[in-house]
Amino acid sequence: MSRKIPLAWLQLTRERTRLLVALAGIAFANILMFMQLGFQDSLYSSNVRFHTSLQGDIVLISNQSSSLISMKSFSQRRLFQTLDFKEVESVNPIYLDFTSLKNPDTGHPRNIFVIGFNPQSNVLDISGVPENQKKLTLPDTVLYDSASRLEFGPIAREFNAGKSIFAEVRLRRIKVVGLFTLGASFGADGNIITSDVNFLRIFNLRQQGLIEVGLVKLKPGSNAQVVAQNIRKYLGSDVNVMTKQEYIDFERNFWATNTAIGFIFTLGAIMGFIVGTVIVYQILYTEVADHLSEYATLKAIGYSHKYLLNVILQESLILAFLGYIPGFGLALFLYQKAREATLLPLFMTLDRAILVLILTFIMCYLSGVIAVRKLSAVDPADIF
């Protein structure tokens, strides 16, 4: 096999311009797949960061809730009923809602996600929350997400500079007393955290005790799956009872199946694969067409048809490897720029890098398989 590789390499490098065009086409297809798969993964990751940060084992939500951006309220009495189980150590009600926050500089309002809970309880494992949540016991105070979109204004920068930050949230003047880092998502451009009491001051039409999420913490050694199943039977069907992982999967499944976004990103990756296949096929087909007489000569002097097929397939694999390298490098650059522009968790992962590499090899191999059909017409008589 090693003796056949130089012929494939020499054929590819004979036309340098054609080779560069082929590598550019493969790199473009790689970038398209990397970006689509990256955005899809960031979509899922950004929308479950709240879920993964919950300091509990079991989650209760209304049976009418479909995702974090479409939550319905239920009575917190249902949450406190779980204390009847000996495995339950503590429970925490959490309020969630969207409202407008005015940019302190421009006065322009923008929707922001508000999280409310008892600041005396350990509810969220988010950087900046545990050390600052006791400050929320003061009236009209909030913690601001420093990773929120810049359209909310330079709140985080000015707070870090030592300035007192006041803003208007739902026609109520609030003070920023600390920062945390959660990050924007496809569902929310920014986030603030406040106490349950301050939450009800902001949403003054909300009824106390109607919550969006009930968080249950179990005693060490308890089986969350078994306890969740028992609680589910005990409470009935008006609330959904899930383990923390099931709650994460519930949210991911919503974005994957109930919205067009997940489908669009998957379709984009497929289109990148198809585009790359067509580009490589055109290059290899041209290579075969330009060297038909040479292939006929090789057949005439005794080389088998299988040998010629291997040469073309080796060309496709060489193109796949060489085209992947610049595609990977440019994808890293674009990930960084997109991350800075959107504040979404867009990072390269080993699994995605390997997946796109495998897809690139498959893409080029399929192109080679299609292109070698031209060789079936090669006959030694063609040299005459």
Image (tube, grey):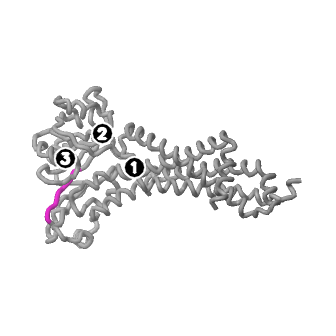
- Find the distance from the CA under tag 1 to the CA under tag 2: 15 Å
**Residue drawn at (47%, 56%), measured in percent from left and top?**
354
Label 2: element kind: loop
The amino acid at mark 3 is Val
**Residue drawn at (25%, 41%), measured in percent from left and top?**
145
The amino acid at mark 1 is Leu
What residue did someone put label 1 on? 43
**Which label number is shown at residue 148?**
2
Where residue 372 appears, as percent x and y from the top left, is 71, 57
Q: Earlier in the sequence, mark 3 or mark 1?
A: 1
What residue did someone put label 3 on? 129
**Which label number is shown at residue 366?**
none
Front-most of residues 384 and 158: 384
- Residue 51 vs 14, above or below: the answer is below
The amino acid at mark 2 is Ser
Residue interval drawn in magenta: 89-95
**Residue drawn at (27%, 31%), measured in percent from left and top?**
154
Name of the residue lying farthest toward the top: 106
Front-most of residues 126 and 184: 126
Label 1: element kind: helix
- Find the distance from the CA under tag 2 to the CA under tag 3: 15 Å
- Residue 310 vs 323, above or below: the answer is below
Q: Earlier in the sequence, mark 2 or mark 3?
A: 3
